[in-house]
Amino acid sequence: MSGAEVVEPEKSLEGISSQTEGSAAVGEVPRNAAEPSEKKVAEGSPRSSEKSDKMDWYIIKVQTQREEAIRESLKRRIKLAGMERYFGEIIIPTETVTEFRGGKKRITKRKLYPGYLLIQMELNDDTWFLVRETQGVGDFAGAAGRPCPVHPHEVARILAKQEQKEGEVPRLKINFKTGDKVKINEGTFENFQGEVSAIDEASGRVTVMINIFGRSTPVELQYWQVELV
């Protein structure tokens, strides 16, 4: 294909930044890439219900805090253009986490890669143009502006996080790390300050070194009993 050339090896998610500000940068248009209008794409695309067998997963950069709206916009444009057979799932990578706020337990969804979507599609000039011309989309992740497919094992890892098994305990969301200065906000040592020396994510317990009568003493607490200073 002349426009959106696929480059090997496949793309890994490990290098993706977890934070993006505002609109993602727009990459350069592939040489000789067709730029049909949405109407022309719809007229020129078969409306077969059979899904393409040439689909891969790609990463697209989008505006942060607008991931859901952009995903819905992509779905509408794909349907309007009659190109459903060239597209599969569009995923906002998330994981289920448990957190405590004000002493109350909450189970929430957390974005794994804010500012990014995973999209399953057959890459050609028309599909590339439809995605890139969707408001809020910056560019495909890849080398030198060329989209690279995501390695299958990376996709499997993300999908596994999406599908939490029944009865499985959600991962705890702990907002501090070993060495951080914290304040105890509940219990016998309320208002004491100290340093985190150990974290047990499985149980949600942390060990904090505090000063008692001039001696550094370890105190074991639930992670929601402490806060960053």
Image (cartoon, rainbow, N blue to C red):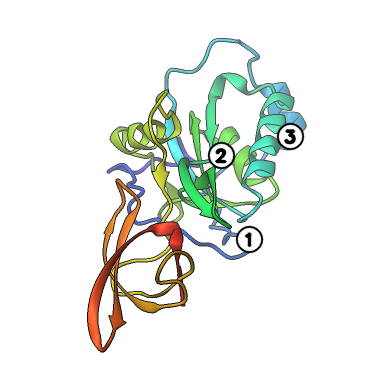
List the residue tagged with mark 1: 23
Q: Which residue is at 43% across, 18% downward?
A: 53
Query: Mark 3 or 2 closer to N-term?
Result: 3
Q: Which residue is at 73% across, 37% downward?
A: 37
Q: Which residue is at 43% across, 49% downward?
A: 146
Of the two numbered discs 2 and 1 in the rendering, the one whose residue sits closer to the viewer: 1
Q: Which residue is at 31% across, 47% downward?
A: 203
Looking at the rendered structure, the kind of residue marked 1 is Ser
Mark 1 surroundings: few (<14), some (14-19) or many (≥20) residues within 10 A:
some
Mark 2 surroundings: few (<14), some (14-19) or many (≥20) residues within 10 A:
many
Alpha carbons under labels 3 and 2: distance apart: 12 Å
- Residue 128's tag is 2
Question: Height in image: 166 above or below 72?
Answer: above
Mark 3 surroundings: few (<14), some (14-19) or many (≥20) residues within 10 A:
some
Question: Height in image: 52 above or below 210?
Answer: above
List the residue tagged with mark 3: 38
Residue 21 is situated, as x and y percent measured from the top left of the image, at: 58, 65
Alpha carbons under labels 1 and 3: distance apart: 22 Å
Looking at the rendered structure, the kind of residue marked 3 is Glu
Mark 2 residue element? helix
User: Cβ–Cβ below 8 Å for labels 1 and 3?
Assistant: no
